[in-house]
Image (tube, coloured by chain):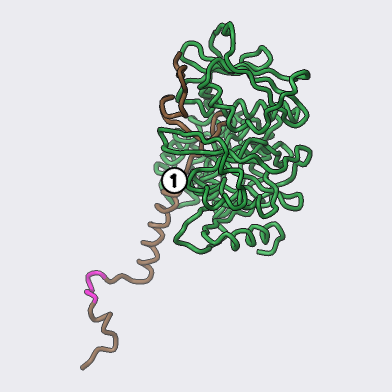
Amino acid sequence: MHEFLSKAVEDKSIVWFKASNNYIILEEIAAHLVHQILENKTPQKIATKLAEKLTISEQEAIKAVHDLNNRIVIPNTTKTTEEHTSKSKYGLPSSFAFKKHYHIHNKVFKVEFANEFQLSLLHPKFAHLETQETSKIEHTFQVFNANHLIHLVLDGECIGSWEAKNVHYFQGKFSMKIIECIYTKSEAEWMGVFHASAINYNDENILILGDSGNGKSTSLALLQAQGFQCIADDFVPIDQAQDVYSFPAGISIKKNALPVLLEEYPELETSAEYHYERLNKTVRYLPPRKIDYSKAAPCKALVFIKYDATIDFEISKISKLKAFEHLVPDSWISSNSKNAASFLDWFEKMPCYQLTYSNNELMYSTIKRIFEDDL
Amino acid sequence: MKSKNPIKDNVSNEFTITRKEALKKIGEYGKYTALTAIGTFIILHPKKAQATSVINNDDNNGLISPGANGFFD
């Protein structure tokens, strides 16, 4: 029997398949047919009932059932293994050109980089956590290239090897390993990691989402300056119990956001600047003001944010299905059945908003009102 | 004499149908609407692994200044 989950959201159903870890939004009647196929009922039997219900011919009904089987059930009950990584054979370099130590939560991590380029992939986001304390190293990462792949080794074990085009997965895995180590939770204990920013107020969190360039990080920095607590930027881990955890990487601030942030963060004026040539982006990293590792807290709402100079302020509650369409492809969601069930339950109760603004004051007060159940 | 129902007068009898016929036709469309709906769905693929924001596309050339040692050393 193939493992799957199903949840009614608005007027549709969301069906999740363990083998593919895909989420499919479909009509309730189609979800019902998929359930019957998965229960191994014969297509003929399913089609007979469908033909009666819709007063269509059995031929049309059986075509619809076969279509669902071929397009949904078969592809999603076949295990796929593409993970953008491999564990190829490698030899450790004889020496590492750069060694950094980071104090994260209550642990010291040593990270060795074979060359400057690899250093540039990880260090800028964690530079504010660098420490000179090198006596009690808990974990050692090694980063090096071999066979045209970038390799990540943690405490002597190869975590993975990535091609250059998948370097963002290498960076994601490094961040994931940091999370696993500092909170002593294995990957299977995390519900997911979301491409969002997270802020905390009165022991609750809001996830700020949106396409790249919409202003997630800038909004996060602005909100932090107003007294909201920064929990995470770009990489928001949520565990099985649906609590959001702090991730201490720096907040990435693009050059065009500097003017609006310099008043609150004069230190940005002299921060190191990193230039991403291909994207023509220049980024500085702003350390979160206060990181509270002990305080995992639930999520109150999802806010899809967009800074738009032509719009003063607009907020509306949005369709959960639309929100789901944006959220899922941008997130890592654990393929563990328990975690997938937790994710669907979590999402079902999550209010979703679209907030477009250029008026900062209205943005702050509205976020506060969402936290205070006053919207 | 002016018609009481100019709209009706303008409609050719050739295209008028009774209420019963209209309902039957809607019923037919309803069936096909339901069939079309069954075959309409969205498949969403979560990321296969944890990732940070994509800051380069298809090679290493765009990513920061790698210094003397590039990605493919």
- Residue occupying the far front of the picture: A270
Q: Chain letter for green, please.
A: A
Q: Where does the image place residue A115, in percent across and percent down from the top left? A: 53, 17
Q: Nearer the viewer, residue B23 or A262?
A: A262
Question: Residues in magenta?
Answer: B11-15
Q: Is residue A271 magenta?
A: no
Q: Nearer the viewer, residue A238 or A37?
A: A238
Q: Where does the image place residue A279, in percent across and percent down from the top left? A: 42, 36
Q: Chain letter for brown, please.
A: B
Q: Nearer the viewer, residue A251 or A100?
A: A100
Q: Is residue A356 above or below residue A328?
A: below
Q: Where does the image place residue A72, in percent across and percent down from the top left? A: 48, 36
Residue at image position (41%, 48%) is B36
Q: Is residue A8 visible?
A: no
Q: Is residue B67 left or right of residue A129?
A: left
Q: Secondary structure at mark 1?
A: loop
Q: Is residue A116 visible?
A: yes
Mark 1 lies on residue? B40
Q: Where does the image place residue A222, in percent across and percent down from the top left? A: 61, 52
**Quarter of the figure that contains the N terminus of chain A:** top right
**Quarter of the figure that contains the C terminus of chain A:** bottom right
Q: Nearer the viewer, residue A232 or B3?
A: A232
Q: Is residue A131 above or below residue A98?
A: below
The amino acid type, in three-letter code, at marker 1 is: Thr
Displayed quadrant of residue B21: bottom left
